[in-house]
Image (cartoon, helix red, strand yellow):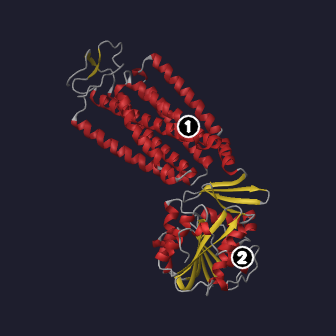
């Protein structure tokens, strides 16, 4: 059988083949569940942290820390001096406890102290990584033992001083045969790939749900970990000393108490977090099919919409933004019968377009059907957009704007790009040269395009880059303008055309407005000295 540790001897195997099979299956299943839970937990942390912060950095932060911590757990399992079966069960229960404490605490800590929750993010990801490495290593260690303990002479290897032949099994380095090594490697690969796939699907499903449901999903994922630990304890109880059994029971009771308590208070945790972020009463909160967190708040007559924590409009002053967005390019356009709105699923840009009798068709392209359905059906929201989403001239297409422009065969006279700021990959490509060039192929001869171009003061460089991207994409005529929106600050816009000269002096607002008139519209093209800087006004 190979070399032996000191004070070892051959002891007849007291385990039946059926018991050994039961143990083997239990280890494999528990390992699968643990890897699945760990991956899903990291996806969840990355998703939540990315929602509150710069997504490019914080999505990779939890994943990177976890991957760094897994080898530490593997190393710890090698130096554990004790019963490997007990340590496996204890590690599983500890992972359940970490999840029960950390996930609700993550939301509460962010709500109470803001960025101080970074310490908890690091603690949670390190703990999950270490426990994951420990559990995988211990599982493989026990699997090796189970494969070899009753082979070649029906004996197990154990210390002579052990009072029970099933206690403290010594796992020699030479126990793993070539066949078992290959089996272990391939089973680990398939286990990890399967867990990764399922965890990805679960993370995607989480993105479709409200945060409260997401928190509940995490806790429901914790319960299988808890059950796994208890099942393994019952299967391996004959291999665990009596004093260790008492410790397992304590860990089980603590984990159950924390899990049920956290699950019961998940809704209050959500309310605390939302109150911290949004201040006003939250009347709607949901994750859309594209993974965006959409929140609506209400204070007196002020209804506000947020996507991933960023304000999209306030019903008190939205008319200022949408009048600037719509009426200036409409005044500069030669033809304006066929209009396209990219984004604008709230129907507010469509409301302004419908003031023009020349408009025959309006196509709204918004990736999230949850948003368009909400603003098409909700009584309060329909009163804000004048029920524009149900106007017979309006067609709603729930598709990614990039894919829509790539495949559509129509030509448009006026295109209004009302998309969120390019804070992630999903939206950055909609401000790219490639996208603007594709869009140019879908424009009529004298078409006009306008896009919101972020904050003029705080994102001045982006404001100029958007204008430059239009120029580089073949739009020969561009103009930059801005206006003050109380809810946003100073908002920038870029209007562009391929063939038509944009003569600002001929702007005439021919429809009824609350904010915009000819004089205000023309003055909006004046850029202050600190905004111009070293840039040249086109």
Q: Which mark is residue 243?
A: none
Let me know if residue 439 appears in the view.
Answer: yes
Which residue is painted at 50% across and 43% down in the image?
Answer: 41
Label total for image = 2
Dot 1 or dot 2, earlier in sequence = 1
Give the residue number, with chain letter if any, for mark 2.
520
Task: Find numbered disc 2 in the image and state the secondary structure of the residue it sits on.
Answer: helix
Q: In front: 352, or 253? A: 352
| Residue 391 seen in the current view | no
Q: Give how far across and how far down residue 136 sits, in percent.
A: 38, 35
Q: Position of residue 83 (x, y in %)?
A: 38, 22
Q: Would you identify the image quadrant in which residue 302 lies?
A: bottom right
Quadrant showing the C terminus: bottom right
Does 56 sit above or below residue 366?
A: above
Camera-near label (1 vs 2) is: 2
Q: Mark 2: few, some, or many residues within 10 Å (few <14, many ≥20)?
A: few
Query: Which x, y percent locates residue 292?
Result: 57, 57
Quarter of the figure with residue 350? bottom right
Between 52 and 185, which is closer to the camera in this rendering?
A: 52
Pointer 1 with pointer 2, Cβ within 8 A = no
- Left or right of residue 244: residue 527: right
Q: Residue 469 in the image: state x and y as whole percent.
A: 49, 72
Q: Which residue is mark 1?
A: 102
Quadrant of the frame with the N terminus: top left
Q: CA distance from mark 1 to mark 2?
A: 53 Å
Up the image or down, 415 lies above or below 105; here it is below
């Amino acid at each position: 059988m190979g070399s032996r540790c000191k004070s070892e001897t051959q002891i007849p195997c007291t385990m039946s083949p059926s018991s050994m099979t039961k143990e083997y299956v239990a280890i494999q299943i528990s390992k699968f569940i643990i890897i699945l839970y760990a991956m899903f937990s990291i996806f969840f942390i990355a998703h939540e942290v990315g929602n509150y912060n710069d997504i490019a950095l914080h999505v990779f932060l939890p994943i990177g820390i976890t991957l760094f911590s897994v080898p530490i757990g593997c190393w710890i399992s090698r130096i554990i001096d004790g019963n490997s079966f007990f340590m496996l069960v204890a590690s599983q229960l500890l992972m359940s406890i970490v999840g029960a404490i950390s996930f609700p605490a993550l939301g509460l800590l962010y709500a109470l102290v803001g960025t101080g929750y970074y310490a908890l993010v690091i603690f949670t990801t390190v703990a999950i990584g270490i426990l994951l490495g420990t559990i995988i290593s211990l599982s493989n260690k026990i699997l090796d033992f189970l494969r070899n303990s009753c082979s070649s002479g029906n004996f197990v290897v154990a210390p002579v001083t052990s009072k029970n032949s099933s206690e403290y099994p010594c796992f020699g380095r030479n126990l793993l045969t070539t066949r078992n090594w290959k089996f272990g490697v391939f089973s680990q690969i398939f286990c990890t790939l399967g867990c990764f796939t399922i965890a990805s699907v679960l993370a995607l499903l989480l993105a479709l749900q409200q945060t409260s449901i997401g928190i509940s999903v995490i806790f429901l994922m914790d319960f299988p970990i808890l059950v796994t630990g208890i099942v393994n304890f019952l299967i391996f109880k004959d291999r665990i000393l009596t004093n260790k059994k008492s410790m397992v029971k304590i860990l089980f009771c603590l984990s159950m108490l924390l899990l049920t308590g956290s699950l019961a208070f998940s809704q209050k945790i959500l309310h605390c977090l939302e109150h911290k972020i949004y201040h006003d009463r939250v009347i709607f909160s949901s994750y859309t099919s594209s993974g965006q967190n959409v929140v609506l708040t209400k204070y007196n007559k002020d209804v506000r919409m947020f996507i991933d924590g960023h304000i999209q409009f306030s019903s008190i002053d939205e008319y200022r933004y949408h009048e600037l967005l719509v009426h200036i390019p409409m005044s500069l356009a030669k033809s304006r019968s066929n209009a396209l709105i990219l984004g604008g699923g709230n129907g507010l840009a469509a409301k302004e377009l419908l003031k023009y009798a020349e408009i025959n068709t309006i196509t709204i392209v918004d990736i999230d059907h949850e948003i368009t359905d909400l603003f098409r059906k909700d009584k309060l929201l329909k009163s804000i957009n004048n029920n524009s989403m149900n106007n017979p001239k309006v067609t709603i297409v729930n598709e990614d704007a990039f894919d829509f422009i790539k495949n559509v065969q129509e030509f448009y006279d006026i295109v209004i790009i009302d998309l969120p700021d390019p804070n992630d990959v999903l939206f950055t490509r909609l401000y790219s040269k490639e996208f603007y060039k594709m869009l140019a192929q879908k424009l009529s001869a004298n078409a006009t395009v306008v896009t919101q171009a972020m904050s003029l003061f705080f994102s001045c460089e982006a404001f100029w880059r958007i204008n430059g991207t239009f120029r580089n994409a073949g739009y020969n005529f561009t103009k930059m303008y801005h206006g003050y929106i109380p809810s946003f600050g100073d908002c920038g816009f870029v209007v562009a055309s391929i063939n038509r000269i944009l003569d600002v002096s001929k702007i005439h607002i021919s429809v009824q407005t609350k904010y915009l008139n000819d004089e205000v519209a023309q003055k909006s093209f004046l850029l202050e000295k600190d905004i111009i800087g070293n840039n040249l006004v086109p």
